[in-house]
Amino acid sequence: MINANKKRLRRTMMFLNAQKPGLIKDPYIYRPDSIMLDLEDAVAENQKDAARFSLYHALKEINYRGCERVVRINGLDTPYWEEDIHCAVAGGCDAIRIPKTECALDVQRVEAVVEECEKQYGIPEGHTLIMAAIESARGVMKALEICESSERMFGIALSGGDYTKDLQTHITGTGLELMGARQNMIIAARAAGVQCFDTVYTNLDDMEGFRRDVDTIHLMGFDGKSIINPRQIGIVHEIFTPTQKDIIFAEKVVKEIDEKKALGIGVFTVDGKMIDIAFYDGAKRTIDLAKASGVYKGDL
Ligand SMILES: CC(C)(COP(=O)(O)OP(=O)(O)OC[C@H]1O[C@@H](n2cnc3c(N)ncnc32)[C@H](O)[C@@H]1OP(=O)(O)O)[C@@H](O)C(=O)NCCC(=O)NCCSC(=O)C[C@@](O)(CC(=O)O)C(=O)O
Ligand SMILES: [Mg+2]
């Protein structure tokens, strides 16, 4: 019953305030992989109704041209989250982002309302996916159970602002304070077979720092990053899209492993590097990512 979009390409997931017509009318022109229409912290407390109204009409009326539409609902400790889900599901959103997720039960409470809403608004069962933002020490410690909490779960995301507040530190720009959470979350996500996304980088005047941050999380194995501004898209896509050199090497690895296997040879070299069966999945993943990113020109 659950849809195939769980594994889609999500290098960039761009936040925007669901209440701002100037932002929600055409964010697809910047070509992020996903947009995250925010009902939570970007929306002032006395504007929640107005934001929901604007969100519902945007989802209904605007053709986002294949860009995934995720709605960040308010926290489960507020009076808003259930109505947020009603609006988002009735509008036909692709996914719900749960903020400040602390345990599997949080996800299951959201899932129950999503299920009810899909029935009520005639949305195909299983259409609405779920992702969970982890924003506390407790959430990080429960990352694996959160990843495994629902069939609808496609990924977890670190939310560094609230997380560092909970840790009684702050964002330094070095990534030092996020290291443990990042490592724990990527391990949990991989163990559960879901995607993992890094937190926003809030200094829009420091593009060099942003590039270093994206390089780090790319090397750590993340699938992508939450972003706040279209100016951040190019750098993330550049770093997360395989280069032609990577693709050609991956093709050689896949072809050579297939050929050598038939000849009963287990270990050999490609371009001077030792290759065996352990490299097969990684090479396949590079090719799949190249295909999903629209840069693949080969025949595999
Ligand atoms: C920061 C700023 C005000 C700067 O505006 P500025 O106007 O100065 O930017 P400019 O670059 O000059 O804009 C050039 C052109 O792009 C358009 N444009 C800009 N941003 C766009 C966008 N996002 N989407 C579509 N379009 C956009 C703009 O309209 C203009 O269009 P035009 O006039 O036509 O040329 C703006 O970007 C913005 O609002 N960002 C989103 C902020 C937000 O949602 N925060 C909440 C989520 S984080 C959080 O809650 C913390 C967290 O929870 C995180 C976690 O969970 O990870 C945790 O705990 O850490
Ligand atoms: Mg937050």
Image (spheres, rainbow, N blue to C red):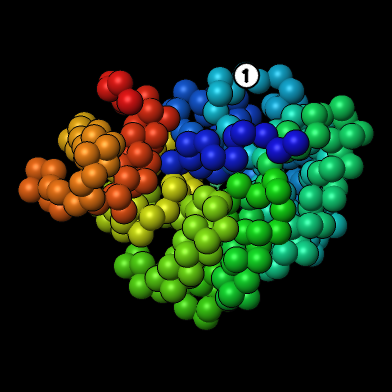
Instruction: Tell me the residue at 43%/36% (across/down).
Output: 230
Query: In the rendered structure, which amino acid carries the disc numbered 1?
Result: Asn
* Horizontal side of residue 75 vs 205, given as left or right: right
Is the residue indicated by label 1 positioned so its CB lies within 8 Å of ligand 1? no
Considering every residue shown, the one lying at the far right of the view is 120
Q: Position of residue 206 (x, y in %)?
A: 30, 53
* Horizontal side of residue 27 vs 247, given as left or right: right
Q: Is residue 143 above or below residue 198?
A: below
Q: Quadrant of the C terminus?
A: top left
Tag 1, which secondary structure? loop
Considering every residue shown, the one lying at the far front of the view is 264
Instruction: Please state the total of marks drawn on the protein image.
Output: 1
Q: Position of residue 283 (x, y in %)?
A: 30, 42
Considering every residue shown, the one lying at the far bottom of the view is 168
Q: Residues within 10 Å of mark 1 (few under 14, many from 20)?
A: few
Q: Position of residue 59 (x, y in %)?
A: 70, 27
* Horizontal side of residue 137 vs 40, given as left or right: left
Q: Is residue 173 above or below residue 268?
A: below
Closest to the observer: 284 or 296? 284
Instruction: Tell me the residue at 81%/44% (across/down).
Output: 114
Q: Quadrant of the N terminus?
A: top right
Closest to the observer: 146 or 31? 146
Residue linked to disc 1:
63
Q: Quadrant of residue 254?
A: top left
Closest to the observer: 279 or 200? 279
The answer to whether residue 112 of the structure is visible from this angle is yes
Closest to the observer: 283 or 245? 283
Instruction: Tell me the residue at 52%/80% (across/down).
Output: 168
Q: Position of residue 240 (x, y in %)?
A: 34, 42
Instruction: Tell me the residue at 35%/39% (across/down).
Output: 284
The answer to whether residue 41 of the structure is visible from this angle is no
